Amino acid sequence: TQDMAYRNILTKEDPLLYKKSREVTEFDGRLHQLLDDMADTLKQANGVGLAAPQVGVLRRAVLVAETNVPEGQEEKIIELINPVIVATDGEQTGAEGCLSVPGEYGIVSRPLNVTVKAQDRYGKWFEVSGTGLTARGFCHELDHLDGHIFLEKCQRMLTEEELNGDN
Ligand code: NI
């Protein structure tokens, strides 16, 4: 097996997180290494999504975990290069967090169903639809590519008591 490679995740104080990322134009080994490292980093951090700018690379590439898998199957990680949202439907309101904002969660409304058009790591275009947490992840990660973090969209932050989860 290959060695795992982890990249440092920037936190909300870092100005890079507020910049717009550029399109990916080279679907080469360097991109594949970035995506592989991001997947290792995401798994190690137990996250559901990660955008390239969060590891300091201002390119339009994100990972989102497809969490709606049959029981017993491993979550699949969807790679989205140059992604664009092409359809949304419904609404969900719930808690959201970000690996760049550790320990803080807020209530954010997002579409319930989201379809994204994107390129894969070889440059081939495809469409993928997600619902629930996956749809939330698409929106959250794509926001990172335009320099936005979820704190801007929070209706309110969760309290200490809510975080400790007694209710
Ligand atoms: Ni995030």
Image (spheres, helix red, strand yellow):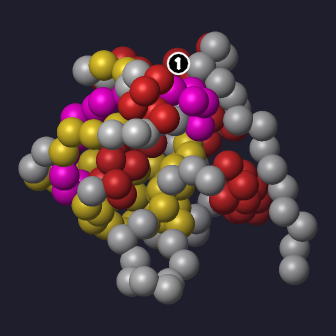
| Amino acid type assigned to the residue bearing label 1 in the image | Tyr
Position of the C terminus by quadrant: top left
Question: Could you tell whether 50 is left or right of 131 in the image?
Answer: right
The mark total stands at: 1
Residue closest to the eye, 96 or 165: 165
Q: Is residue 120 above or below residue 111?
A: below
Any part of residue 14 in sight: yes
Question: Could you tell whether 128 is left or right of 123 in the image?
Answer: left
Residue closest to the eye, 152 or 61: 152
Counting from the top left corner in percent of width and height, residue 48 is at: 51, 53
Q: Is residue 163 magenta?
A: no
Q: Quick check: is the Cβ at mark 1 less than 8 Å away from ligand 1?
A: no
**Label 1: which secondary element:** helix
Q: Residue at x 59, y 37 (%)?
A: 99
Q: Is residue 112 magenta?
A: yes
Q: Residue at x 54, y 78 (%)?
A: 74
Counting from the top left corner in percent of width and height, residue 140 is at: 39, 39
Q: Residue at x 30, y 30 (%)?
A: 107
Counting from the top left corner in percent of width and height, residue 130 is at: 29, 62
Magenta range: 99-114
Any part of residue 26 in sight: no
Residue occupied by mark 1: 18
Q: Is residue 139 above or below residue 73?
A: above
Question: Could you tell whether 38 is left or right of 23 in the image?
Answer: right
Q: Residues within 10 Å of mark 1 (few under 14, many from 20)?
A: some
Q: Residue at x 40, y 22 (%)?
A: 159
Check the image and name the residue furthest to the left: 90
Question: Could you tell whether 34 is left or right of 108 in the image?
Answer: right
Counting from the top left corner in percent of width and height, residue 103 is at: 57, 30
Residue closest to the eye, 130 or 162: 162
